[in-house]
Image: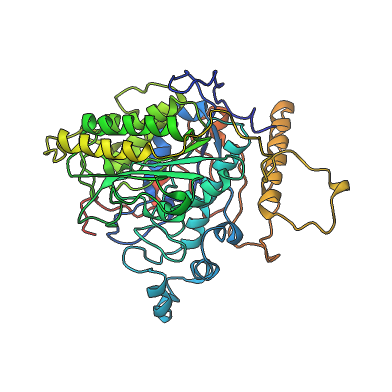
Amino acid sequence: MDPSSAGSGGNSLAAVAGTDAQKRRVCYFYDTEVGNYYYGQGHPMKPHRVRMTHALLAHYGLLGRMQVLRPLRALDHDFCRFHSADYVAFLRTVTPETQLGRGRQLRRFNVGEDCPVFDGLYAYCQSYAGASISAAVMLNHGTHDIAINWSGGLHHAKKSEASGFCYVNDIVLAILELLKVHERVLYIDIDIHHGDGVEEAFYTTNRVMTVSFHKFGEYFPGTGDIRDIGYAEGKYYCLNVPLDDGIDDDSYQSIFKPIIGKVMEMYHPDAVVLQCGADSLSGDRLGCFNLSGKGHAECVKYMRSFNVPLLLLGGGGYTIRNVSRCWCYETGVAVGEELKEKLPYNEYYEYFGPEYSLYVSSSNMENRNTNKQLEEMKCKILENLSKVEHAPSVQFEERIPERKLPERDEDKEDPDRRPDPYFDRFLSARRRLKHSARSRNTGDTREYTETEAKDQHGKIPTTEHRGPEPMEEDLGSSKQAPPADANGMAINAPGNVKNEPESSPK
């Protein structure tokens, strides 16, 4: 089965920038094990929020509106496209048991309190980064209009160090993948924290424009001044929108839409990556903005309206009942479905009391962003944008994606060709899709097992490398199929996860 025909995603309508066609072909990446990873007692970052989001998607029936895929696990050579080899080797080998004897490396790579060593750390990085790379591959091949990975969006990680709960910068890796096919990529960050890791990675290039809307001042990471505009060829291709406490929906959109609208007009990106960090929502455990769920999702709706290939990623968000509701609502926006306010009963229903509503409300907190301040900032940013070389409206010459979907003719292969592990895993996944299609069409109930892939050193990885294969949700089921290995956990079995009250101190 060809990935473009798998699943139940809607068909794309004619692309007209600024208008909103009803349906999009959407693919969604989810690893059944992502909710098992645990940063530690009292740590605000909880991957379990992604499992909660998935449960809401299942019970709202949204999984039947998308192609649901298990991500490929990223390998060392994938990480090393951005990260240094010694940092990647450290992440792969460090464990809670061995970290005590590696104090110098822990300090060097900034691994410690905010970015702790926990069981399965490297597998966690492989999972969320692999999902973002796989999503970019799907957009490169034009099989989908929107790709979603709520486990990704970890925007603080640097080339050789962890930062702000982030170890591997999946966003940079996904953008690098998109740049194989797309001439210009626009990155937009609506997390309350500045997207410093992504900005730093592309600060001197005009092939990626970064735009970050964030809290600025005495606030982590302390970067993102409006005067930071890029350097060398990247000058004016970096935009920072520093905001103050309490910004609400109306104020946010009064600056978001004019700036992004002008960016789309001047830069004319071939693909857009939108980091949807949910710590900019009202009531976030670590945040201080006052956006409602609908106000946050308005950014997704606006970017969807341009009908440009769109990658939606997660990010921050530490009041997990709000995060999961927000990302569920935004998934509905992506597929073009209006969701009912009353939450359907689900495995985590008690998290959402007492209102049991899909909508995250804003509060009456003070908005310290005055209209005058916002207007002055908008004018300054638009002035900088006017200095950007206007991109031509014609599309550049189409490039063939390096990571191909079609099967190759093994009889004509060059025996001296350097193997591409990612290609081999993707090809294996494609074959499984075809086997799955045949078995459904013929009533064959045999199970097809995945051939183990070797890493770049020729060794069998200890973690399973799942290809982007359809999950049970592709068939319209509202329940998650159990993972293939005994250590996995189905969506309806939350008992293996350590849950703590959200009011726990950091």
Residue 468 higher or lower than 296, as above or below: below
Extreme residue in the bottom direction: 101
Q: Nearer the viewer, residue 294 or 210?
A: 210
Q: Residue at x 47, y 34 (%)?
A: 390
Left or right relative to 54: residue 259: left
Residue at image position (71%, 51%) is: 451
**Which quarter of the rendering shows the C terminus?**
bottom left
Q: Residue 125 or 309: which is nearer the viewer?
A: 309
Residue shown at the point (44%, 43%) measured from the top left? 209
Report the label total.
0
Residue placed furthest toward the right: 411
Q: Whole-percent x and y of residue 403? A: 67, 45
**Can you tell which quarter of the image residue 321 is in?**
top left
Quarter of the image holding residue 180?
Answer: top right
Asked whether 22 or 16 is in front, the reply is 16
Q: Which of the image's four quarters has the N terminus?
A: top right
Relative side of 173 to 56, left or right: right
Q: Is residue 239 among what the camera can see?
A: yes
Where residue 231 sits: x, y (%)?
42, 54
- Residue 496, given in percent of the width and then of the height, sits at 41, 53
Please tell me in which quadrant of the rendered image residue 264 appears.
Answer: top left
Q: Is residue 300 above or below residue 203?
A: above
Q: Residue 491 versus residue 459: which sits nearer the camera?
A: 459
Tell me, yes or no, if residue 59 can be seen here. Answer: no
Task: Tell me the residue at 65%/35% (across/down).
Answer: 397
Which percent across, then down, holds residue 358?
A: 30, 30
**Is 469 above or below relative to 90?**
above
Q: Is residue 474 left or right of residue 430?
A: left
